[in-house]
Amino acid sequence: MDWEFNTRDRGPYWDRLGRWAQCRQTSSEGLTKLHNPSPITISDRQICEALSIYAISPNEGQIAKIREYIDLLLRWNRSVGLTSVTDPVEIVGRHFGESMYGSKMLPVENCRLVDIGTGAGFPGLALKIISPGIQVILIESNKKKCAFLSEVVRNLSLIDVEVRAERFEQIRPETIQANIITSRAVGEFKRLLRWSTNGLARRGHLMLWLGAEDSTRIASTPGWNWQPAAKIPDSQRRFILVGRPIEASISQQ
């Protein structure tokens, strides 16, 4: 797996944005308290500036949802372990911005989207916030993470969102028929590609968040038509790859 896409290894992702450097200074004592944690401090302006890099302009309601999501993420993270990124501004860019940038690659509004190995809800729930009309199915095998996802859905009053606590291989792909299948963290792509071939509706697309090496390798997979990998803004080695099965390969299965 590409180093830059391993969110467990927190790097100097926002270091070059000097005006936000102070946001990363948090007390170790505050991070260990499980009871009565302080609410996060991040302004509307900081959220908008972080997302502007990805050409995303959230409205007031979406900003409020992002802020509440981050608050839930950091609270649950102390016991569940959802992300190593704990600076709120960095979370906006790394998780929300990069996820929402997928809406620039494909028209997602009013589609049926299935997010494989969604983890803390990225990219699936981030895309739901920026494109409320989509129907989202979140597939995650970790039940504790599924409990977190359900809590986010309830607190943010999101509709048309289903959380499924199982591995995608356990689901018959023919029952999915998604317009878009997304994945940001699935390591075994051969199984995902086979599953997606039958899980996508006609002319549906698979959208993957990848490192440079994986994007090059997967783009050469036979039986698929791939668009040129799109570099994620403010990154040198992270890409979004969009493709769909060649119709002939579907009919032969």
Image (cartoon, grey):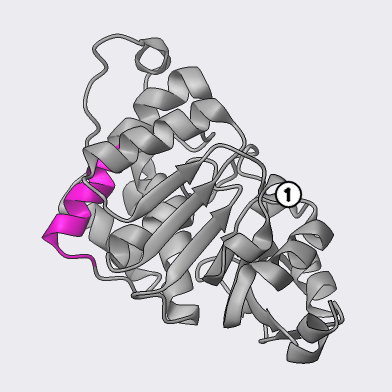
Judge left or right: residue 111 versus residue 188: left
Farthest residue, direction left: 60
Principal secondary structure, stretch drawn in magenta = helix
Q: Quadrant of residue 62?
A: bottom left
Q: Which residue is drawn at 43% across and 16% down?
A: 28
Left or right: where 25 falls relative to 106: left
| In this view, 21 is above or below 217 | above
Does residue 217 belong to the magenta stretch?
no
Residue in front for this viewpoint, 167 or 221: 167
Name the spot of residue 239 as percent of width and height, x first: 63, 70
User: What is the total number of numbered labels drawn onto the structure image?
Assistant: 1
Other-residue count near label 1 (Cα within 10 Å), few / some / many at <14 / 14–19 / ≥20: few
Name the foreground residue: 70 vs 51. 70
Q: Position of residue 172 (x, y in %)?
A: 68, 55
As helix, strand or loop, the secondary structure at mark 1 comes to: helix
The residue drawn where x is 14% and y is 56% is 61
Between 183 and 111, the residue placed more toward the observer is 111
The residue at the point 47 percent across, 17 percent down is 79
Q: In this view, does 70 lie to the left or right of 5?
A: left
Residue displayed at 46% across by 51% down: 95
> In the rendered image, is residue 25 in sight?
no
Residue 243 horizontal/vertical position (percent): 66, 80
Residue positioned most to the bottom: 248
**Left or right placement of residue 80 versus residue 19 in this view:** right
Magenta part of the chain: 58-70
Q: Name the residue under label 1.
A: 169
